[in-house]
Amino acid sequence: MRTITVILGAALLTFLLLFQLTATPGVEAARQKLRTPGVTPTATPAPTTTLTDGYRRGVNLAGADFGESMLPGTYGVDYTYPTAAELDYYQSKGLTLIRLPFRWERVQRNLYAPLDRTELGRIDQVVVAARARGMQVILDPHNYARYYGNLIGSSAVPNAAFADFWHRLAAHYRDEPTIWAYALMNEPYNTGGMWSAAAQAGVDGIRAVDMGHSILVPGDQWSGAWSWQQANANLWVNDPANNFMFEAHQYFDADSSGTYGQSYDAQGAYPTIGVDRVKPFVAWLQARGARGFIGEYGVPDNDARWLTVLDNFLAYLDTNGVSGTYWAGGPWWGNYPLSVEPRNSQGRPQMEILVRHLSR
């Protein structure tokens, strides 16, 4: 149950967003109040990307998104964060863009509440370590357009609550150039047409306090690149900073789920299947003069032919200037076949392909 203070705080935020306030003394005071120790701010960053930029390549470092059935869960038992040693490894490979999945419920324990200082401090530690290594971070609430299972835009999780979350997180990081982009949400699905309004609420929450950082806008129905033109044909957001990209995901097994439950042949795979899967998304971007990002893609290590698929896929993204992050690295993957986390100090075969397609 919310307290009176929380309700009044939510009402105040909604009032500010409706009037599209930018940097006023009141907003600045709120920003300073929300900031927690850990990240030392520097000058307000310029936009992290422009329409004429090249492309970036990186990797998802998962772990803070684990334990979704145990929310908020226990740190070190149900979930974890990437270590400095992992950052060193990926930095040494030239993969300097880190997509950092985490759970909204852990960072904000109740809707409209202040962000949890302990959890935010853990994210701060990753950001500080990345900054020291010349790397950048994408913040990714890995929640599938839901909060404790309730859909954003429903009465249980109003769009104003999503705006509040992003308002608070962007207020904390608005001066941090190590942040490459805010990814609004991981893989919305079955939203009943409500995702577009929710995405706009997230953009509004960010832009009330941060006009500098890029925003990644995912599509509905798991953000599938292959199905983008059917599921997200009319998706758009109004961004006063005009600094956003659309985020799609793409895997190459039969149902594009990334589970790879059957063999290469049984999946009906072929060398350019990844290119064919991502083409609808790239064509949609080109038709609208929009920028795109592939937040997840990956192949298993059990058949070298998947490496050819990945190589061809990345070459196509290179040619079209589309950035992306591989799924996945991270400390707790064990024998997960898509993982590029070293095992017994040995690199994974997928890494041999990734280093051929570094940022430009």
Image (cartoon, rainbow, N blue to C red):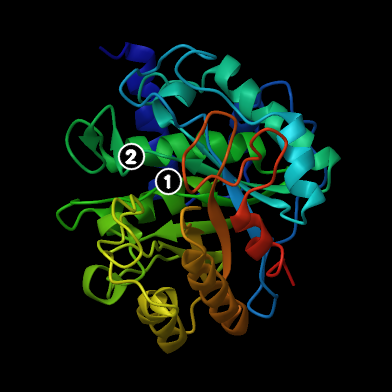
* Image coordinates for residue 207, horizontal then vertical, percent: 53, 52
According to the picture, the residue beneath numbered tag 2 turns out to be 160
What's the residue at 55%, 49% (across, down)? 182
Q: Is residue 245 visible?
A: no
State the residue lying farthest toward the bottom: 287
54 shown above or below 108: below
What's the residue at 73%, 52% (across, down)? 96
- In front of the other: 325 or 234: 325
Q: Amino acid at mark 2?
A: Ala
The quadrant of the image that shows the C terminus is bottom right
Q: Residues within 10 Å of mark 2 (few under 14, many from 20)?
A: many
Residue 123 quadrant: top right
Considering the numbered disc 1 on the image, is that residue within a helix, a strand or a loop? helix
Please indicate whether residue 190 sits to the left or right of residue 346 in the image. Answer: left
Please indicate whether residue 71 sits to the left or right of residue 343 in the image. Answer: left
**Label 2 or label 1, whichever comes before in sequence order:** 1
What's the residue at 39%, 17% (across, down)? 72
251 shown above or below 51: above
- In front of the other: 71 or 5: 71
The quadrant of the image that shows the N terminus is top left
Please indicate whether residue 207 sits to the left or right of residue 218 in the image. Answer: right
Q: Amino acid at mark 1?
A: Leu
According to the picture, the residue beneath numbered tag 1 turns out to be 17
Front label number (2 vs 1): 2
Considering the numbered disc 2 on the image, is that residue within a helix, a strand or a loop? helix
